[in-house]
Amino acid sequence: MIYVYALTDPVEPPAGLRGFDDAPLSVLATGGVAAVHSAAPVPSPEATAAHLWCHETVAEGLMEAGAVLPARFGTTLAGVATLRALLERNQRVIRPALDRVRGLVELGVRVRRKAPEVDQPVECSPTEAGAPGARSGRDYLLRRLDQVQSERAREDRVQALARDLHAPLARVARHAQRARPAGGLVLQAAYLVTRADVPRFVDRARQLDAAHDDLEVLCTGPWPAYSFVPELDRQSPSGDAGADRDEGVPGG
Amino acid sequence: MSQLPAARDVSAVELLDRLLEKGVVLSGDVTISVAGVDLIYLGLRVLLSSAETAERFGAPVPSSAALEGDALRSVATDSSPLDSDALDPDALTPRRTPPRDSGP
């Protein structure tokens, strides 16, 4: 079993960089792309904090040598033949993806409210159709309409705010990726910026933070480009009988 | 300290988010073998997500003390080792998330 840390340019990893359990790193290069791997921890990599940081450290170390598309944590394959088949099948996707992230780092931004948004008290909850306050069906429907409209207005305000926050950050970035903000976040996004632009980006984040008393703008990084990776074709090719087989959800 | 607020806590969330939810998927069966860690992950995650999400995963919200650790990454600094003792999985109820994309 091998553990894959990242897809990279076909270059040697920086000297001294080691994998799990101090395992030496190997590079498998084919068709202008490469993958960096090592022996997999047996039976499978445990997601301890130390392992998570090891994966991260390898991905970051590789960025000194060339473009890096970090693999998801826990990526184990049966062997080098499987990896080679994957690279060959996907090189047309991997190469442009490497080009896109080359020389860039990812910065993460989350914007959240310091306190929940204060709202006008709502008299009639949407689930209480027969609430005591509702005299007639018409009254009730009017009130519901009001509610729906104010809800929508609030969503619009949040989205407008998210756009206002995103735009100045995106202008410093080469690429940006906005996630649907979950859990009351106003903005959740990742930005690919040149290393030289990192201080400028962080300054902008600070400015945004200072300009909005009610918001916290949280910026982390620089990370490898985890949020800017391509989706690969993982189908096992049927004619690939010589390849070692991927297998094994342990105890599955 | 001129750092953005709570950057230390968020950095751990962001790391876990990236390593466990993003990155190139090469294998159909990315597995994480320690139940405790999904917990750490979920525990950290609920700091920033809704109570509804927390409930859905049955994850208790960790005390902020569980996140104290001087090794969490802060904004625009180089990586530093995360002190595993700082994130004590035993502090959280053992419960595992169902695997996302692997069927039985």
Image (cartoon, coloured by chain):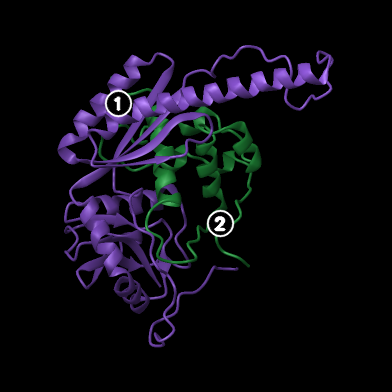
Q: Name the residue under label 1.
A: A205
Query: Which x, y percent locates residue B84?
Result: 44, 43
Q: Residue at x 21, y 46 (%)?
A: A104
Horizontal side, residue A197 vs residue A4: left or right: left
Colour of the chain lettered A? purple
Q: In this view, does A39 lie above or below B63?
A: below
Q: Residue furthest front?
A: A138
**Discs 2 and 1 share one subunit:** no
Amino acid at dot 2 = Arg
Q: Quadrant of the N terminus of chain A?
A: bottom left
Q: How many labels does the image show?
A: 2
Report the chain shown in green: B
Q: Which residue is drawn at 32% across and 69% down?
A: A90
Residue B72 occupies quadrant? top left
The residue lying toward the viewer, choosing from B80 and B74, is B74
Residue A240 occupies quadrant? bottom left
Residue A32 occupies quadrant? bottom left
Q: Which residue is drawn at 60% across and 22% down?
A: A149
Q: Name the residue under label 2.
A: B100
Horizontal side, residue B55 vs residue A81: left or right: right
